Image (spheres, coloured by chain):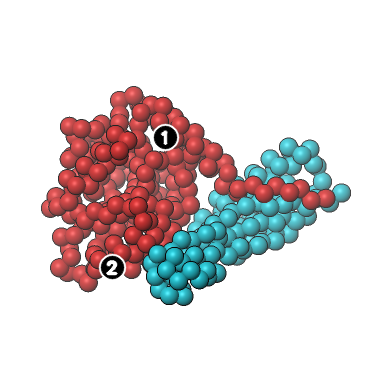
């Protein structure tokens, strides 16, 4: 006999993500999923955004890495509460890992939860974590063809933050090309150009994030 | 992508479905629908299934995979195109004013059980 199931294979992840979202919403915490390649500057960007927002928002971070606690030590140094998830080889975070990490965070004391995903432009696209916004971080040294080569991660993102703009004179990165490609994949998506080391563009990106946290 | 964790979720779904239906027979076939834009590699799914299925309710099942295509609908030329990969411009006229439909399915369609 044949049982017709017609079930989503990742239904369990989607259900857990919905539970995470409900839990965060009930606590008044805005959740951000930060994706991008290893070395794109996700941690440095978060450090710069948190410094900019320190009088406006109380953040916490979940750091996803295959191994080690280098990133969470950086967050501790700037006084941001952090939970480290080591995936021990897995290429992405999933909603179940976030559900476990949420038990270790005092949600009452924060406004913003940033989840720094495992550095990966492929697998992280497939897993809803329960976030309200996903931002994709792309550095100028990675090249302006990434939206064409990894479209899924750009398509599902609400904003693209182009980092390391201080390196532009040393690359052939075409800002207009990547912005046009992103616009096609994510017509509503916002684009920011930032250099975290110089501080360029950080205020604009931080203002946008603060607006989103307030529900605008 | 991450086919091992997808196949783990698949086997959980099969177990759950059999429990709900009260079925105890041997699973002979699983039909999956894996869209062309899902980012999931069918060969890797088969490989991961071979690794993970032994000792579970799904052990020994044949895996049949349908791969639904996606459609690119262009608002500039109005010519719909079937696509295998995510595109950012219309394959027919090159316009960026497009919408993509379908191709993202990742479904367990049916389970065949030997009586």
Figure quadrant of the C terminus of chain A: top left
Q: Chain of mark 2?
A: A
Please rate how many residues cluster around mark 2, counting C-alpha atoms within 10 Å: few if below 14, some from 14 to 19, many from 20: few
Could you tell me how many numbered marks the image carries?
2
Q: On residue A101, which mark appears?
A: 1
**Does the residue at mark 2 contact the one at mark 1 (Cβ under 8 Å)?**
no
Residue A177's tag is 2
Q: Is residue A215 left or right of residue A194?
A: right
Residue A87 spot, x, y in % from top left? 44, 46
The picture places residue A164, in percent across and down from the top left corner, at 20, 58
> Camera-side residue: A204 or A69?
A204
- The red-tinted chain is A
Q: Position of residue A76 (x, y in %)?
A: 25, 36
Residue drawn 82% across the image and 46% down it: B25
Colour assigned to chain B in the rendering is cyan
Quadrant in the picture for residue A115: top left
Q: Is residue A21 visible?
A: yes
N-term mark: 2 or 1: 1
Q: CA distance from mark 2 to mark 1?
A: 38 Å
């Amino acid at each position: 006999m044949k049982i017709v199931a017609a079930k989503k294979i990742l239904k369990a992840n989607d259900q857990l993500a919905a539970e995470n979202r409900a839990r965060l919403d009930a606590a008044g915490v805005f959740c951000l999923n930060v994706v991008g390649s290893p070395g794109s500057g996700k941690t440095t960007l978060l450090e710069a955004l948190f410094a900019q927002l320190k009088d406006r928002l109380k953040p916490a971070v979940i750091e996803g890495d295959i191994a080690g606690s280098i990133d969470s030590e950086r967050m501790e140094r700037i006084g941001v509460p952090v939970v480290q998830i080591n995936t021990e080889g897995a290429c992405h975070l999933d909603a179940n890992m976030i559900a476990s990490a949420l038990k270790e965070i005092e949600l009452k004391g924060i406004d913003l939860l940033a989840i720094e995903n495992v550095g990966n432009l492929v697998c992280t696209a497939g897993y809803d974590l329960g976030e309200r916004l996903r931002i994709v971080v792309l550095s100028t040294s990675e090249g302006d063809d990434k939206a064409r080569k990894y479209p899924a991660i750009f398509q599902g993102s609400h904003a693209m933050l182009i980092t390391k703009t201080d390196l532009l004179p040393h690359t052939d990165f075409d800002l207009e090309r990547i912005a046009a490609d992103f616009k096609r994949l994510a017509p509503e998506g916002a684009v920011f150009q930032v250099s975290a080391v110089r501080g360029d563009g950080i205020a604009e990106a931080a203002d946008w994030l603060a607006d989103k946290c307030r529900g605008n | 992508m991450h086919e091992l964790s997808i196949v783990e979720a698949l086997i959980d779904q099969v177990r759950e479905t059999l429990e709900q239906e009260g079925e105890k027979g041997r699973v002979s076939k699983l039909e999956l629908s894996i869209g062309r834009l899902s980012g999931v590699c069918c060969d890797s799914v088969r490989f991961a299934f071979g690794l993970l299925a032994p000792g579970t309710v799904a052990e020994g099942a044949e895996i049949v995979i349908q791969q639904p295509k996606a459609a690119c609908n262009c608002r500039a030329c109005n010519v719909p195109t079937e696509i295998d990969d995510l595109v950012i411009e219309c394959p027919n006229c090159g316009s960026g004013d497009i919408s993509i439909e379908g191709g993202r399915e990742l479904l367990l369609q049916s389970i065949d059980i030997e009586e």
